[in-house]
Amino acid sequence: MEMHYPDYYSVLKVTHTGVVYWGGGQVYVSHLLRDEYIGMEQVADGVWDLYFGPIRLGGFDQRKVGGGNTSYWTIRV
């Protein structure tokens, strides 16, 4: 089933490793959603919520970067 998201969402495809590439970095979503499309909604300055259809998966603050040389975020439920 194809998911539909509002026009103001960023829609990204989850890779086979469970990440989406966004903003010059990677956001870990879940390997269970590989090859699916998720929607990202900006809810505040630098704060994003992620959705799989109508289900909110969690969110992250892009100003808080983890990892080494590459920006890497994990979502918080």
Image (cartoon, grey):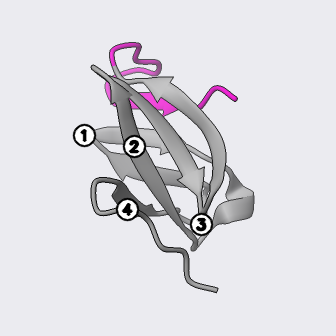
Considering every residue shown, the one lying at the far top of the view is 64
Q: CA distance from mark 2 to mark 1?
A: 17 Å
Q: CA distance from mark 3 to mark 2?
A: 22 Å
Mark 1 / mark 3, whichever is N-terminal: 3
Query: Mark 4 packing: few (<14 Cα in 10 Å), some, or many (20+)?
Result: few
User: In the image, what residue occupies the spot 46% across and 18% down?
Assistant: 66
Residue 42 painted magenta: no
User: In the image, what residue occupies the spot 42% across and 32% down?
Assistant: 48
Q: Is residue 43 above or below residue 64?
A: below
Amino acid under disc 4: Pro
Instruction: Please give the residue where the numbered disc 2 appears in the rendered image.
Output: 41
Residue 26's spot in the image, x, y percent? Answer: 42, 41
Instruction: Please give the residue where the numbered disc 4 appears in the rendered image.
Output: 6
Q: Nearer the viewer, mark 4 or mark 3?
A: 4
Badge 2 vs badge 1, beta-carbon distance below 8 Å: no
Secondary structure of the residue carrying tag 1 is loop
Range drawn in magenta:
63-77
Badge 4 vs badge 2, beta-carbon distance below 8 Å: yes
Mark 1 / mark 4, whichever is N-terminal: 4
User: In the image, what residue occupies the spot 49% across and 26% down?
Assistant: 60
- Quarter of the image that includes the C terminus: top right
Q: Is residue 40 above or below residue 62?
A: below
